[in-house]
Image (tube, rainbow, N blue to C red):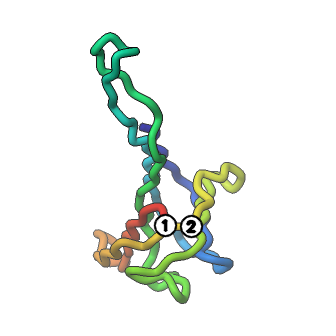
Amino acid sequence: MAVKHGKNLTGKWESASIGDVTNFNVQQVNRSVDYVSSSSAGETKRVAGASDISGSFEMLADAMPSGLAEGATGALELTSDGTVKVLDRSVLVTDIDFHVDVQNLVKATVRFAQA
């Protein structure tokens, strides 16, 4: 499983910029399929299964673009250091948590899964 983290992020939801992204986490997983057959002499073997992506990003809540809400499906693009495209997929927003950090900034953590 590949886990990607980043700093100095930019992001887009559909075509709208996501302002003030402070961090993110993207997890890419391949769900392997186990099997046993006469050709494997009774040993368990694995083949690649379906790929899946999930993750989250944190942003300042007042910079949230229109349409970014729980249950929304759309194109999410996350870029690190201005040039490294980490994610460019259609995702489903699973939940959004709002919290206040020690500097009294209202932040939102947006969690998503592959759509």
Alpha-carbon span between mark 1 and mark 2: 6 Å
For disc 1, the neighbor class at 10 Å (few under 14, some 14 to 19, many from 20) is some
Of 39 and 18, nearer the camera is: 39
**Residue pictured at 37% horizontal, 36% vertical:** 33
**Image-quadrant location for residue 55:** bottom left
Which residue has dot 1 on it? 115
Residue 25, how many percent across, how many down? Answer: 43, 53
- Height in image: 48 above or below 64? above
Q: Which mark is residue 102?
A: none
The picture places residue 110, in percent across and down from the top left corner, at 40, 70
Return the mark for residue 90: 2
The image shows residue 6 at horizontal and vertical percentages of: 51, 50
- Looking at the rendered structure, the secondary structure element under dot 2 is strand
Q: Looking at this view, is 81 or 77 the one in front?
A: 77
Name the one closer to the observer, 27 or 16.
27
Mark 1 vs 2, N-terminal side = 2
- Residue most toward the top? 41
Q: How many numbered callouts?
A: 2
Q: Residue at x 41, y 61 (%)?
A: 56
- Mark 1 vs 2: CB contact within 8 A: yes
Label 2 Cα neighbours within 10 Å, binned few <14 / some 14-19 / many ≥20: some
- Percent x, y for residue 98? 31, 78
- Rendered view: 34 above or below 98: above
Q: Secondary structure at mark 1?
A: loop
Q: Residue at x 46, y 80 (%)?
A: 72
**Above or below, 99 relative to 83:** below
Instruction: Check disc 1 and give the amino acid type.
Output: Ala
